[in-house]
Image (cartoon, helix red, strand yellow):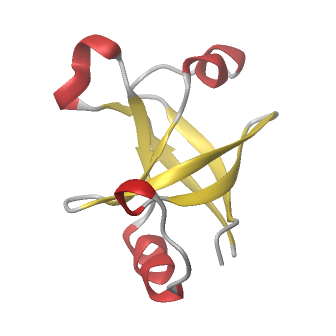
Amino acid sequence: MEVHFDAELWIWDARRTDTWTFVSLPGDVSDEIRELGGPRRGFGSMRVLVRVGATTWRTSIFPDSERGYVLPVKRAVRKAESLDPGDIAQVTVTVLDL
């Protein structure tokens, strides 16, 4: 499953001093991923391949009770793509755990 969407970068409130930065997957995409079933890892995560701009990496998406699935965007990606919290990123997510 591969999805493309635009999303705003936001900082996780619980770890604000560590600047954990995420984007939220759209609600309909999160619902579709939940319906896929498949293996889940720690904290209910699923492995994904992500592309933001010219940067591609492997990571995991995590379920969030308020936002659906969320995707961490690491500092190296934000720096390479000149992104800061509040910016809108073009994101492609390919779910690997099917």
Percent position of residue 81, x then y: 68, 22
81 relative to 50, above or below: above
Q: Quadrant of residue 96?
A: bottom right
The residue closer to the viewer here, 47 or 13, is 47
**Going 65% across and 56% down the picture, which residue do you hit?**
48
Percent position of residue 1, x then y: 69, 76
**Going 54% across and 75% down the picture, which residue do you hit?**
39
Report the number of numbered marks. 0
**Going 43% across and 64% down the picture, which residue do you hit?**
26
60 relative to 75, above or below: below
Percent position of residue 31, x then y: 40, 79
Percent position of residue 41, x then y: 48, 61
Q: Is residue 24 left or right of residue 16?
A: right
Q: Residue furthest right?
A: 54
2 relative to 34, above or below: above
**Going 61% across and 58% down the picture, which residue do you hit?**
47
The residue closer to the viewer here, 31 or 89, is 31
